[in-house]
Image (cartoon, grey):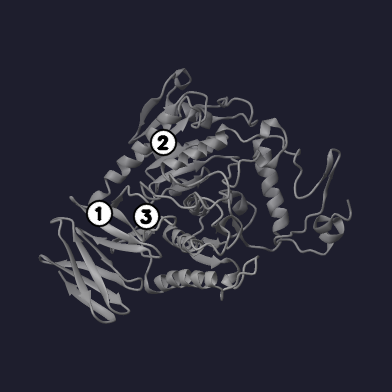
Amino acid sequence: MPYNGLHSDIAARTRPYGGIFAKHRPIYTDHGIFIHYDPFGVKDMADGANKFIANLSYSRGESTRHTGVTPIFRYLYQAGYEWLGAEQIYGPEDIIMSALRGTSRAYGKKDFGSLHAMQWGSQPFTDPKHSLRFFLSLAVAYIHGSSHINTEEGLWTDEYSNDRYTKAGKEHLYAQHRMLDYIETHSRIGELKTEIAVMIGRNDAWKTFGRTSLWSQKGDKWAFNKAMESFDLLKAFYPENNLDYCSTDGLFTTTPYGLVDILPIEASSEVMNRYKTLIFLGWNTFDNADFIRIKKFVEQGGTLLLGAVHLNSELQPHIPAKFPEYDLVIQTLLGNDYKSYKTKTIIPLGKGSIIYYPENVYPADDLIKERYVEDMKNIASNITSKELEKGWIKPSQNIDFAVWDSDKFRTLYLLNVDWKSAHPSQQAKLVLKNHEFNIDVERYAITTLRCHAHIAAMMDGNTSDILSISQENEQCIIICQTTGEDTICVFNGLTGKQESRKINSPGIHLIEF
């Protein structure tokens, strides 16, 4: 094995740690010689996580930044990386960004980024719709909070020698400049509003990049299973995302309830308490300290949705879940007689409540799947129903939206994710106070609504923005900036009235309604 090309002992001697071809020497065992990892070396789920972290740490070298295409970001932080990014246009964009954001919050990282690929799953580069998908990928990253947005190869050329001077290249430059112009003329104010956290449990091996074995291990017990499949229930929140493989279909989705976070269970109480609901789906190895924090979360008013399988002390993935021997925190959470429950039980605790499924099956199992999804949707509906007065988007076909709140105003970011049809725009439904308004959402744009009290306002132009909304007596005063001629549209949630005004010059404008 000393001359196995890029992965030989000799080649490894001359390579640094870190990078796409890290300093990995062949692994010599009594059951074979392997590259990168031993596919027979993992004992159980905890061992799989530990070995994976050790492998990442060993190969990291001096690197401090890494991008990835699956939601396993927590293990990269644990391996010592300081900054992480999502590799986009490879898989379900909203889901991967939700996992990156939730994990970064759990690990106290304010900044995280995105790398936008130009080939592989998104190819061919010359597809007339490729540049639109590229724009959508940039825009999804922005509304999810990406602080560093990078394009693979800087749009100079791709792996198939398509450069920026070709027809397709110029279309991609247009998309990139549309996004850059928007970013340079708008402020992303406040904080992204996510009130639901879907939990990633301890020792979880879920990924969205194919349905291969857990921890890349050989053997029947490591086959893709119901614990991993249960993350498919994320489609309750991101219905068109494809959680299976790399494809143009399933990259983008509507967001009927806005955005959610995907949060590692080791998150602190401070992080957990920013949410109103915690939802368990996939694998979790029970840890007493985790559920002490979760119990406090419920007592303070949170809602918890989980099943018996999420209180699992069994580390083997093919053996049915079992409760831990030391279960005092479970008793205080679910009641002393929790082992006797036969059907779904709602348990009040402090100011909050737990929705508990005692069946020893994961949420993807047909025995409970339909009811579990219904509970997820009901929880989300109850949360969003309280937001309508401040400005919200009703479930709208082909519309992805995010909500950012600040002391100044609420901002609604809307994306038209229909890249397939010939329609240049899609319609969203804005709800404000007691009235609904139709909003046209164009392609190659982030439609931006600024909301304050009973007023929402938006500009037509890509490089115009609302700077402030205030009221004096019965008059609404809006200050906006433009880079040329534009139109401002104002929606009144008290009267249901919608007004537009033409602006004829660039600059800062004070407009009274």
At mark 3, the secondary structure is strand
Residue 205 at x, y = what percent? 61, 41
The image shows residue 370, relative to residue 458, as above or below, that is above
Say whether residue 284 is visible: no
Pointer 3 or 2: first along the chain? 2
Q: Which mark is residue 148?
A: none
Q: Amino acid at mark 2?
A: Leu
Crowding near pointer 3: few (<14 within 10 Å), some, many (20+)?
Answer: many
**Residue at screen point 65% across, 36% down:** 45
Residue 393 at x, y = what percent? 30, 52
Instruction: Identify the residue at the far left of this view.
Output: 473
At mark 2, the secondary structure is strand
Say whether residue 499 is visible: yes
Q: Which mark is residue 401?
A: 3
Crowding near pointer 2: few (<14 within 10 Å), some, many (20+)?
Answer: many
Residue 224 at x, y = what percent? 62, 36
**Residue at screen point 54% across, 36% down:** 229
> What is the distance, in whole Å, between disc 3 and disc 2 at their CAs?
25 Å
Q: Nearer the viewer, residue 273 or 255?
A: 255
The image shows residue 246, relative to residue 15, as above or below, that is above
Front: mark 1 or 3: 3
Front: mark 3 or 2: 3
Q: Amino acid at mark 1?
A: Lys
Quadrant the C terminus occupies: bottom left
Q: Which residue is mark 1?
A: 390
Pointer 1 or 2: first along the chain? 2
At mark 1, the secondary structure is helix
Q: Which residue is mark 2?
A: 304
Residue 78 at x, y = what percent? 62, 51
Q: Amino acid at mark 3?
A: Phe
Give left or right: position of 422 versus 476. right
